[in-house]
Image (cartoon, coloured by chain):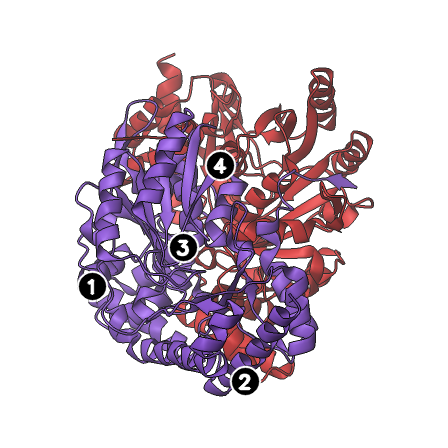
Chain colours: A purple, B red
Amino acid sequence: MEELHGSLSEPVLDTMNFLNEITHRYPDAISFAPGRPYDGFFDSEQVFACIRRYLDHLAEQGASAQDVRTALYQYGPTAGLIRGVIADSLRADEDTDVPAESIVVTVGAQEAMFLVLRALFAGPDDVLLVSSPCYVGITGAARLLDIAVRPVEEREDGFDPSDLESAVLAELAQGRRPRAFYVVPDHSNPSGTTMGPEAREKLLELAERYDFLVLEDSPYRQVSPGTPLPTLKSRDRSRRVVHLGSYSKTVFPGARVGFVVADQRVRDPAGGEHLLADELAKIKSMVTVNTSSLSQAAVAGALLGAQGRLSQLNAEAAAHYGEAMREMLRQLDARLPAERREALGVSWNEPTGGFFLTMRVPFRVDDARLITSAKDFGVLWTPLTHFHPGAGGHHGIRLSTSYLTRAEIEEGAARLARFVEAQCEAL
Amino acid sequence: MEELHGSLSEPVLDTMNFLNEITHRYPDAISFAPGRPYDGFFDSEQVFACIRRYLDHLAEQGASAQDVRTALYQYGPTAGLIRGVIADSLRADEDTDVPAESIVVTVGAQEAMFLVLRALFAGPDDVLLVSSPCYVGITGAARLLDIAVRPVEEREDGFDPSDLESAVLAELAQGRRPRAFYVVPDHSNPSGTTMGPEAREKLLELAERYDFLVLEDSPYRQVSPGTPLPTLKSRDRSRRVVHLGSYSKTVFPGARVGFVVADQRVRDPAGGEHLLADELAKIKSMVTVNTSSLSQAAVAGALLGAQGRLSQLNAEAAAHYGEAMREMLRQLDARLPAERREALGVSWNEPTGGFFLTMRVPFRVDDARLITSAKDFGVLWTPLTHFHPGAGGHHGIRLSTSYLTRAEIEEGAARLARFVEAQCEAL
């Protein structure tokens, strides 16, 4: 029997397995748990068309048949084949003008997180600050690398820069170095909150003043209705923002293509100066070598088909997700009207986009209660505590609306209301 | 300016960048450097056919159109979609009968190495032994995880188990724990040596006796002529072997699909028992989430098209590589016949397959000499010292024959012989 590394059985790594197991055990439950994109707009044939469009694009750019074959077949450049296509898309959609060289194509945003943490965190005194509750991917990557994480708790309406400043000062006072702050500024996973324009400016000022980087992860902004706020990266005047990109919601998750914009100048221990992107590529060569050229071709083909505009590519999807969110809010309001929920001590936020909202309840939310909800009420969701790197979240529920039909939302909200009523009654 | 993590600028990570740069600077040089597969048997259309074959296979297995769409589109199972196809292939081709559950599909064998090291190595006293000279992927992954590496030097004819035993004893004597031994038993990269049947049995005995695992990496065996020796995994009676699989040479590198067979029972710190494969999947969820479903579909389609037999799929390729290797040996022998090379103090091994052979020379081989070779003689190769985790390899040259035409091999060997003659003369 082999003994394993000590830190693998942490709860944060077990969240998804636990949820999968519950989902499997109660197949008839309506599930507000998975943050999966809706696949109703997708047809398998699209993938073939996208790959072909990219190969045709290479030929139009002057590639010979042999060059095209090599691009698809061989080991590719570690930093990616489609950096130029991505840079064009960021210019078209995100008011972000960065050279292709500052981009590394990754196996989803997850690999980008891993690479950035591995590159930036040097010693035990370096601390990663995270807006909390927090996407488990970043805390998982930090754990794999034994990086210390300090949560900065969101308020009910979201991130507050003064809380970040207090956390930075507390870390500095203890002799540690806040190296980076991770945040999902738009329609956050899990809370559904969006950072306002002032908080964005203030965050960039803090990063400058206290010399840390901002890791901006924003997978939901282009699949949400309306015009999104400017990204942190587009407002970044002093290269303080490392932008993590995902195509899992905007193109398709199965491709496993993401990217990172890392246009920071860095100095290695030998005194050499490079782009952070070059250092990330070096690390990537020892993790995955390069990103699947097939997948890169499919994503580039999708981008090229929409002149780089993810917003255009996702207009229908964004309207769909927006409507699902509004329907959920309508249904919750119908089942637990203002007066009733106030009496119970129940509330929820009202995101204008994204996949998630959070409900606050007066009873303690844990895995046992989730099982009760699945078994006796036929409805699944995620305890918010799974997303808290520290303690906390014991009265929060994450609800995802991305994957459900209107009928499922209606029935699911009714079941959820019954569950909540019953738990409150038993208090 | 950001300061970076200390261990990124290590020579082992810079090898490929250096070689790429030299190759770029001397485009007319004939290069024995890159270990790339030959792509002459590949047509871009094959990829589409392979993906379709896999999707058809899913439908034949009873998947609905929606199931097929979900398989291609959505986040997939972390451990992989195509584990069953891989397990069938291992039974058909490698006399290895393992349950699909013991397999994790990875982003190339590189990710498999990373996951295995992260799972198995718990503390600073755990040591990774590697057969040296050694593939840079494993030492790179070890470096990313700050894992101590001890090289076990190959002899001129390859790995000798008694050298491994001495290394194990030396580590134990110093209070360290040899946790695993990494080796490429067939047509090794970089040396080209193959481990004989007796050494294989002896290695398995040592693993049992001294309680370490064997990390078996064998990407070249199915693209080499003749019947390969049994894998270590197929002779593994006590689950001592973790088998790392790559489809980069047998299907195509751009897919970035590999796998690991990890059928060991492991105990986590909380006392729970699992398959090592399950633990690897957990770690994978925090590195890449899952492997591209498109790429998995392409690889599975290729396997299904050959009834799982990589040997059959690669019959033409294996003959091609075998002929390239024999041609190289013929040309070297013609340019530097036995008597002449003996007089110079030059020798090389004679692999029966794989992509690489090594030449030993009386002069010191370093990057400066490589530049001379490229600039003045128009021929490129890789200094063996790049593959030595410790000191060593200063008189060795790795020559790759996988990617060159017969005419290039003939001319390249002539140039190489002139370079070697000139260096020996100048001694």
| Residue at numbered disc 4 | A147
Tell which subunit mark 2 falls on.
A
Mark closer to the chain start, 3 or 2: 3
Q: Amino acid at mark 2?
A: Glu
Determine the residue positioned at 82% across, 46% down.
B237
> Spatial distance from mark 4 to mark 2, Cα to Cα?
43 Å
Q: Do circles 3 and 2 both sit on a common chain?
A: yes
Task: Please say whether residue B54 is visible from this viewpoint.
Answer: yes
What's the distance in space between the residues labelled 4 and 3, CA to CA?
Answer: 18 Å
Secondary element type, mark 2: helix
Q: CA distance from mark 1 to mark 4?
A: 44 Å
Circle 3 residue: A109
CA neighbours of label 3 inside 10 A, class few (<14), some (14 to 19), many (20+): many
Is tag 1's residue or tag 3's residue first in the polypeptide sequence? Answer: 1
Q: Chain of mark 1?
A: A
Q: Are labels 1 and 3 assigned to the same chain?
A: yes
Tell me which numbered mark, 1 or 4, is placed earlier along the sequence.
1
Q: Could you tell me the amino acid type at mark 1?
A: Gln
Q: Residue at x 39, y 37 (%)?
A: A119
What's the distance in space between the residues labelled 1 and 3, CA to CA? Answer: 28 Å
Q: Quadrant of the N terminus of chain B?
A: top left
Asked if labels 4 and 3 share a chain, the reply is yes
- Labels 4 and 2: the sequence-earlier one: 4
Q: Is residue A146 above or below residue A108?
A: above
The chain holding disc 4 is A
Q: Is residue B129 left or right of residue A75?
A: right
Determine which residue is flagged by label 2. A411
Work out whether mark 4 precedes mark 3 in sequence or the reverse, and give the earlier one.
3
The residue lying toward the viewer, choosing from A325 and A271, is: A325
Q: Amino acid at mark 4?
A: Ile
